[in-house]
Amino acid sequence: MAILSKEEAQAILKKVLSYSKAESCEVSLNGSNGGNIRYARNAVSTAGQINVMSLSVNSTFGKKTGSASINEFDDASLKKVVSRAEELAMLAPENPEFMPLLGAQTFPESATFNATTAAMTPDTRAEMVGKSLSIAKAAGLDAAGFLENSTRFNSVMNSKGLFAYNKSSNVSFSVTIRNKEGTGSGYVEQDFNDLNKMDVLALSKIAASKATGSAGAKAIEPGKYTVILEPLAASDILSNMFRGFDARSADEGRSFMSKKGGGTRLGEQLFSQNVNIYSDPMNPELPSATWSGDGLTLKKTQWVEKGIVKNLSYSRFWAEKKGVEPIPFSRSIVIEGGTQSLQDLIKSTEKGILVTRFWYIRSVDPQTLLLTGLTRDGTFYIENGEIKFPIKNFRFNESPIIMLNNVEALGKPVRTGSGMIPPMKIKDFTFSSLSDAI
Amino acid sequence: MKRKDFLYLSGLGMGALVLPDFGAYANPIDPLQALDKIDVKIKKELADVALNAAKAKGASYTDVRIGRYLNQFVSTRDKRVQGVANTESFGVGIRVIANGCWGFAATNNVTKESIAKTAEEAVAVAKANAKIQGEPVQLAPQKGFGEVSWKTPLEINAFEVPIKEKVDLLLNVNDIAMQNGASFVNAALFAVNEQKYFASTDGSYIDQDIHRIYPSFGVTVIDRASGKFKTQSSLSSPMGMGYEYMNASPEDKVSGVITRYKGRYDILGDVKEATRVAKEKINAKTVESGKYDLVLDPSHLWLTIHESVGHPTELDRVLGYEANYAGTSFLTLDKWKAKNFKFGNDKVNIIADKTQIGSLGAVGYDDEGVKCGKWNLIKEGILVNYQTIRDQAHIIGLKESQGCCYAQGWNDVQFQRMPNVSLESGKAKLSVEEMIKDVEKGIYIIGDGSYSIDQQRYNFQFGGQLYYEIKNGKIAGMLNDVAYQSNTQEFWNSCAAICDESDYRLGGSFNDGKGQPGQSSAVSHGSATTRFNGVNVINTARKI
């Protein structure tokens, strides 16, 4: 099925709403179209192409809501899905946390769609993967990677006049390159809305050079070290913290954002002074939709300023209960940094460890947000501003809260993993044991 | 319509409710629709369209899966129903080999025309990729079974139990927790029904009806004055069963510091005890780091087995097919070929099994038409086998696949997934009490908690739900802040004793993740309580 334009989506949604007899009704129509190639051992292992569209209806009487969904779009099917949602609403229990629908809103146009990405075919993907494989094969290395592209549209309309539409495209690429002996491994990952920004050749070269450079790693003692985290490594660990910027769990006393004796840590200096975190759907490097799941406009929001917690997210229900404005959470997270490159951070380090990425991060204690996980695919010892030798992987036990209190320097943010994240220099990072894994 | 029995509340529009991830294309449906079946004759006709269309375009092998995946998720929080969702995902996935390369395409438009077009797309994908392919796919031979079927043995289909009964039960769970001093409680019930029809050019037409169930809760106790909060999760296990799992008899209850469950589950009894222990955790003493003998309950050990034995014995990981995501494995082919690699000591026997009744992995046939079986992975401590599928079987000299192929939905391509992997019980009679009596300095761990392991499965760290200090053969009280770190081979070689079969229980995961795009599968792991000597325990307390 096709990716519908704003007008095409609007026409179907209007028609569906015209069939509604409920007190309020909300209809969403979403579709996606995309494909992928997975490769390993220098050859394609699986590949696919998937194309879907579906429509769902939420009908409400009082505080009773029913929902139904369908993937056929003739008039009879559309009438059927509306009446089914209404029948189900009549039988539903009251939801004490139901919020009345929002009326018409004005959402700015997003910058999430790119026509070149949307036009990708199985042959485009095969050609890109061919380039990545050529790097590995030429160097006598083994590549395993994944390339995926998708174009999707999301739209919603309700009986109070709200209409929202977004069309987006994305291409993501990751590759692990290992030497034949299995003694060295390198990794890169990157995603963009715009295919033209994706350079699989350059990215594969970085992974290949890490595979070669990480071979013959030496064991050094676990303990506290100054670390230089590449943006991907920083993102791996910090993405676990962003979910905690939620007012409700903080107010309820079950989050690291909860305050001893009650209340939240909003307004407290929780991090080093050089930590500034915001989200902005209009960031040109990291665009997102301009509306949230509950119909609110996503605006630029400062979460942390000079280490102080400036905002927590409030759902519409929790905001009303607390008498504040709702604040939707955004995935377009930007951690501000400086102008220094990763190389500059390495140069300024007397003794330290460079981490390419982390792996298998899990929460150990939600109270302190203590996390455990391991380094992977390229860990190096730095001495006197230079990478001296590859080292064996470590297990860490560290809290991102403690980590962001030990920030020595932040470099230039780049799009990676969960947002725009700078390379980071962090002191006293806790590694607790060695791993033989490569 | 006889919907009066059903409470129904859902909302997948603007995300008003907390719902689990059902996979990409799951649509909410009326609960009664879940009981409809699709005639097997129609499925055969549709499957033949795919097989013929792909062949006409030059495919040398084709399989087609017509899948109807039903989920029912009932979730509650404190006194409130958070959500009741019934979803259905229905469509067709077609996998082909053309020009020696795999291709896959899927559609949720289940008409003959659309299926034929999708089959052609799968061939086009295969041909595009063949241009960059090295070795052609080598598929282990598989005889066709003709028209056959398999069904999870069950007493009560969970989808036939009125939702009101489930909601009432969960609200009762929450009420018991709140009455006993919990600050917050969430309780949920998840039921899955996979109606899978598989057909291939080998001549198989396999109709399967697979059921799974998972009741769970989490109790939170908050001490406002100190700002501390502690949680306790249910000691249930997801099972390959019907709603009969919710009816425990006295024989299903294993008594001890807390009741654990065998075969069937008592959610009301468990939540009462969970609230008691969650409160105790607030003031339990913090552990002193060091070496301890660990006594691990099956409700905990299943996850250690899953991570440290299940994953490294997956042949696709060993070969490098998962290198870019889940990782590879330390159990390289040379260790298997040597026939003397001491994975563990001679007490350790580990079995792969896709047939165990009640387990999450039990099916009649896998997702590429292979009949399922049972085999040893580790025998008396030695690595003797792996888990594999048709296009990798030849690499370990097998003439046929071990039946480990699975796809989470019709729109996902099938690949190697873990069968149930379980530790054999000790042959000599040994109870938990007798095991603890011999421990001088130890920790008894119950329930699964934090877990992390490296990409080759050497170094791991596990936490649990409950930790009890063992001093001179006796339980000396509850501990906090415990995690143990070890190396897989070292750990399984430190196995000191395994309780007998009467203590054997299953644990498991409803959502084991692997692959790109990511897919989830359900798998069980059985064991009896097991002792490991001299394991490194760290203290995880921090101040922020």
Image: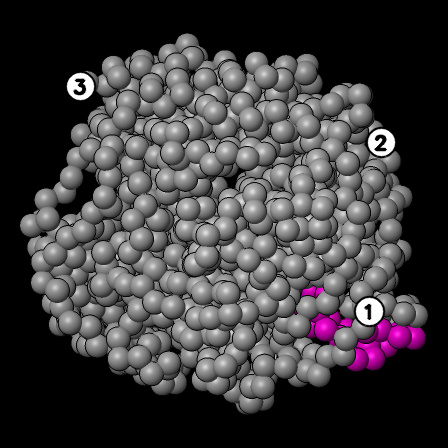
Q: Which residue is mark 2?
A: A268
Q: Is residue B67 left or right of residue A215?
A: left
Q: Nearer the viewer, mark 2 or mark 1?
A: 1
Give the mark count.
Answer: 3
Q: Residue at x 31, y 63 (%)?
A: B374
Looking at the image, residue B541 lies above or below residue B458? above
Of the pair A60 and A165, the residue shown nearer to us: A60
Q: Which residue is mark 1?
A: A221
Q: Which residue is mark 3?
A: B1
The three-letter code of the residue at mark 1 reads Glu
Kindly indicate the quadrant of the structure image that contains residue A422.
Answer: bottom right
Residue B24: numbered disc: none
> Dominant secondary structure of the magenta stretch?
strand
Q: Quadrant of the N terminus of chain B?
A: top left
Closer to the chain start, of discs 2 and 1, is 1
Q: Position of residue A177 (x, y in %)?
A: 57, 77
Of the pair B42 and B182, the residue shown nearer to us: B182
- Label 3 sits on a secondary structure element that is loop
